[in-house]
Image (cartoon, rainbow, N blue to C red):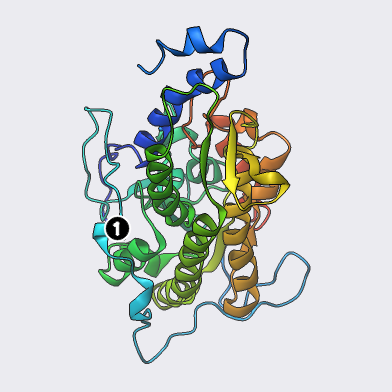
Amino acid sequence: MPMKHQPPTYRPRRICVFALLLALLLPLLTAACTPGAEESAGTSSSEGTSAESSPSADSSGGTEPSAGESSSEEPSLPEESAPPESSRPDLSVLPEESEAEDPSEPSQEVFGDAFCYVALGDSICRGYGLDDPENQRYSSLIGKQTGCTVYNYGVDGQTGEELITFLREGKAEALSQADVVSVSIGGNNLLHVLSTLFFSMLGNFDLNNPASVLQMDAEDLFAAVDDAVTAFEQELPVLIELIGQQAPNAKILFQTVYNPYRSFVFPPLRLNGGPNGGMTTLSALADECIQRLNEKIRDGALQYGYTVCDVYDAFEQNANRLVNASLGKINFDPHPNAEGHAVIAEVLLKEIPKKN
């Protein structure tokens, strides 16, 4: 068993600049929709169950194909699925006290010996944005309720491609002991694309015209989103095969991506060439992109034998209460708060037996 390590430090996700720019623009857009906007806007141009050795049963009672079958050849991605690094904007900023950590050193939390649970994924898995990640993130809540040993390998900003590299380099050592593996990945695949398009959209925004709105071409947006989703679709079987090889007895739980901006029905955005005269909102736009990704996650369960844990559906009715993002507070941080992590834990626990 890997040795116990010190709790990791946290660095922010690359959403920070995206959120900051939206926050700066929101007062201007608000002024454009109120009387006297011209005067007020002129001065405002100032981010499973413990796994059996046999195939796992899904929630409907059927038997899923085994996700742990080994392959004689190392899985590989098509060459075109890896976007060049130069195409990604550098969004790794703030806060200054954040430091990069060695992600090969997981946080180990021992609540008992019921089974071994390994959490893989991005900053949601890591617990970014929580006051006390070691106790509030969903992996810890699961450990407390089941009496298991938890290894959290969450890495801030991680994409599907980066998780594949992480696994190929053997950094998730505890996978060999895992009975349950959860995966939170995919959100950053979309973030890289949307942040690039957002900066392009800002370049066409007229700061001197308070009646203008943020706008982009629908064709450009959805072509880029589809490319990102296609790349993720190609990464998915490689990712599951690598987990299966390294955790042959584990049940794999794959989380869908929630919409952190469900309540953001303002400011208006114009999607040139889009439906409804091109007018949309951040809520609707984010949902359209996220659902395209979630469709691949759900479809992959039948092909690759993992269990889908539908975090998207669980967040839908109370999304504004479960995330840090808040239109009223001009906060665009998409991470779940403590209550949101509790909901994610509930979703995963439906596939994990609780301690007797």
| Residue 356 visible in the current orientation | no
Q: Judge left or right: residue 272 versus residue 120.
A: right
- Determine whether 269 is above or below 189 in the image: above
Instruction: State the residue at coordinates (56%, 19%).
Output: 32
What percent of the width, then of the height, locates residue 314?
Answer: 69, 45
Total residue callouts: 1
What percent of the width, then of the height, locates residue 346?
Answer: 65, 45
Badge 1 marks a residue whose secondary structure is: helix
Q: Residues within 10 Å of mark 1 (few under 14, many from 20)?
A: few
Which residue reaches farthest bottom?
A: 72
Q: Judge left or right: residue 297 versus residue 10.
A: right
Residue with the mark numbered 1: 87
Residue placed most toward the observer, 132 or 210: 210
| Residue 289 visible in the current orientation | yes
What percent of the width, then of the height, locates residue 246?
Answer: 38, 74
Q: Quadrant of the N terminus?
A: bottom left
Residue placed most toward the observer, 210 or 262: 210
What percent of the width, then of the height, locates residue 101?
Answer: 22, 45
Which residue reaches farthest right?
A: 60
Mark 1: amino acid: Ser
- Determine whether 112 is above or below 85 in the image: above
Instruction: State the residue at coordinates (24%, 33%).
Output: 98
Residue placed most toward the observer, 175 or 161: 161
